[in-house]
Image (cartoon, rainbow, N blue to C red):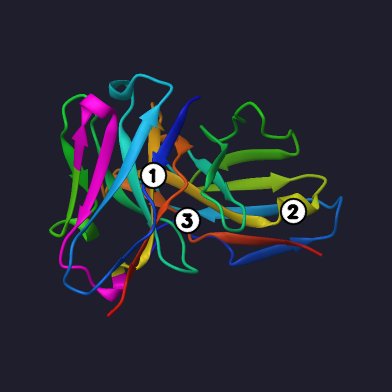
């Protein structure tokens, strides 16, 4: 079954770090790049950037340069999003999504909720 | 702040036709394909329309997309209760060198 399975909810304190995972199955991992999308509670979708699953090269949207890092473990077909120095404004659902040719996302994970609270 | 502008909300009674607009610029919609995503309450977004007007398999024919210049539209013909959701347009933006989503439109079935 073609799917992206994301890790569960996380509750973190301000200043801590978190690592969210996105495991692909049912297709060749390196055939499609993966994107990360953020959605704060009650808000719209925000593109964070993407990672080339063949080369590991990551590209970040302007607002997500610095504390956000995309990485891969190709041996287990998994992409990761690490966020450091967490702030309350990072509280959101984080989705991974597979991108196809003309830039559209045809497969989404269910999302990982990260809550930042003291 | 998104560069693609959508109305905050749209509504209709069952069976009616509802249209959602998406306004952009020459650097995004004007030069790249538009995608539409549907997000049902409490779920992840789902691909609804790609490359301006193409429907993935499994998407009902009552959903259609169009693009003209720097604007795009999503139409729902024969609105059904299960269409109550948030809808987002999206496109690659050449100036930002990134992917941009619209502000989102909440569709309510009255």
Looking at the picture, does residue A43 appear above or below residue B14? below
Magenta-colored span: A71-89
Tell me the residue that label 3 is attached to.
B102
Q: x, y percentage for residue A20?
A: 29, 50
Farthest residue in the left direction? A66
Q: Give the vertical position of B79 relative to B65 (above or below).
A: below
Q: Which mark is residue B56?
A: none
Q: Whole-Å distance between the Cαs marked 1 and 2?
A: 34 Å
Q: Is residue A80 found inside the magenta-colored segment of the image? A: yes
Label placed on residue B18: 2
Residue at the (32%, 36%) spot, across then down: A34
The tag on residue A6 is 1
Q: Position of residue B89 (x, y in %)?
A: 51, 49
Residue A24 picture location, percent across and down: 37, 31
Q: CB of mark 2 within 8 Å of CB of mark 3?
A: no
Q: SS class of the residue under badge 3?
A: loop
Q: Are marks 1 and 2 in contact (CB under 8 Å)?
A: no
Residue B9, position as x, y percentages in the image: 64, 66
Task: Tell me whether marks 1 and 3 sit on the same chain.
Answer: no
Circle nearer the viewer, 1 or 3 = 1
- Earlier in the chain: of badge 2 and badge 3, it is 2
State which quadrant residue A68 falls in.
Answer: bottom left
Dot 3: chain letter: B
Provide the chain ID for the residue under circle 2. Answer: B
How many tags in the picture? 3
Mark 1 residue element: strand
The answer to whether one can see residue B33 in this image is: no
Q: Chain of mark 1?
A: A
Dot 2 lies on which element? strand
Residues at marks 2 and 3 on the same chain: yes
Q: In the rendered view of the protein, which quadrant contains the C terminus of chain B? A: bottom right
């Amino acid at each position: 079954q073609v799917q992206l399975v994301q890790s569960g909810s996380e509750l973190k304190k301000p200043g801590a770090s978190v690592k969210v995972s996105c495991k692909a199955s049912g297709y060749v991992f390196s055939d499609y790049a993966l994107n990360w999308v953020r959605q704060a509670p009650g808000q719209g979708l925000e593109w964070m950037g993407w990672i080339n699953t063949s080369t590991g090269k990551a590209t970040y949207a302007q607002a997500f340069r610095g504390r956000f890092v995309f990485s891969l473990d190709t041996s287990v077909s998994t992409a990761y999003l690490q966020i450091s120095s967490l702030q309350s404004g990072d509280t959101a659902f984080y989705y991974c999504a597979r991108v196809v040719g003309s830039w559209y996302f045809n497969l989404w994970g269910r999302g990982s909720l990260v809550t930042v609270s003291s | 702040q998104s560069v693609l502008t959508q109305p905050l909300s749209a509504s209709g009674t069952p069976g009616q036709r509802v249209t959602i607009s998406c306004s952009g610029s020459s650097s995004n919609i004007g030069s790249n394909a538009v995608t539409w995503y549907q997000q049902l309450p409490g779920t992840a977004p789902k691909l609804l329309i790609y490359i301006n007007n193409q429907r993935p398999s499994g998407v009902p024919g009552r959903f259609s997309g169009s693009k003209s210049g720097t604007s795009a539209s999503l139409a729902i013909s024969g609105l059904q209760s299960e269409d109550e959701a948030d809808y987002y347009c999206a496109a690659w933006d050449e100036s930002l060198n990134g992917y941009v989503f619209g502000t989102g439109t909440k569709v309510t079935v009255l």
